[in-house]
């Protein structure tokens, strides 16, 4: 009886391991396709078949947009990290609205810091996952000109701090 129990347990462990590996491979493939534009040109836009309604841009494209424009006039730079993280370091000219605050809003809510729904908004976070969630929510709320890039971990430009 014990040998039979051991065999069933090993089969269950093997099946669980196979399911875990399959799930990890699926997630890695999904993550790779979601961020495949890291060094190329804008590749995720509202017109693509994946249903993404914002444009994912590379860090280099984000830096070029930021350096060639004027904050608040040509674009709004939106940091979606928590306020304490934003205060530690952020891209100059960025405003902070944490993603949980954005996601908690109703789709018809107004965001005082983002009054023009057609204004170019460049969204970032630390690694890219949170900014994608915020970008989707902004699209759900009717914002039409959203650009998202992977974030501070990849940023090569200037940063500033609100810490003293």
Image (spheres, grey):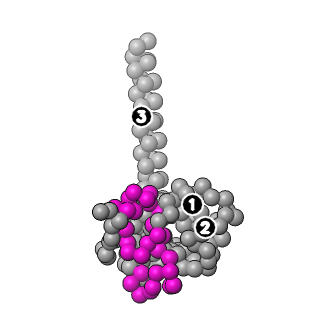
Residue 42, horizontal then vertical, whole percent: 47, 78
> How many neighbours does mark 3 have within 10 angstroms: few (below 14), some (14-19), or many (20 or more)?
few
The quarter of the picture where residue 110 lies is bottom right
Q: What SS does tag 1 mark?
A: helix
State which region is magenta: 66-95
- Foreground pick, 86 / 32: 86
- In the figure, residue 112 lies in which quadrant? bottom right
Residues under numbered marks 2 and 1 in contact, where contact means CB atoms less than 8 Å apart: yes
User: Mark 1 vs mark 3: which is more N-terminal?
Assistant: 3
Residue 77 lies within the magenta run? yes
Q: Residue at x 43, y 12 (%)?
A: 1
Q: Which residue is mark 1?
A: 102
Apparent side of residue 154 relative to residue 16 in the rendered image (left or right): left
Residue drawn at point x = 66 percent, y = 70 percent:
142
Q: Which numbered disc covers residue 111?
A: 2
**Which of labels 2 and 3 is toward the front?**
2
Is residue 49 at all visible to an observer of this figure? no
Q: Where is residue 44 drawn, in percent x and y? A: 52, 73
| Disc 3: which residue | 14
């Amino acid at each position: 009886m014990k040998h039979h129990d051991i065999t069933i347990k090993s089969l269950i462990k093997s099946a669980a391991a196979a399911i875990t590996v399959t799930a990890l491979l699926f997630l890695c493939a999904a993550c790779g396709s979601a961020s495949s534009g890291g060094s190329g040109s804008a590749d995720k836009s509202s017109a693509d078949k994946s249903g993404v309604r914002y444009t994912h841009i590379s860090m280099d494209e984000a830096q070029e947009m930021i350096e060639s424009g004027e904050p608040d006039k040509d674009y709004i730079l939106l940091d979606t990290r928590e306020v304490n993280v934003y205060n530690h370091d952020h891209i100059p000219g960025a405003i902070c609205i944490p993603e949980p605050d954005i996601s908690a809003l109703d789709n018809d809510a107004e965001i005082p810091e983002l009054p023009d729904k057609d204004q170019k908004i460049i969204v970032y976070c630390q690694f890219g996952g949170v900014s994608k969630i915020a970008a989707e929510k902004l699209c759900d709320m009717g914002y039409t000109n959203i650009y998202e890039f992977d974030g501070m971990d990849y940023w090569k430009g200037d940063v500033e701090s609100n810490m003293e």
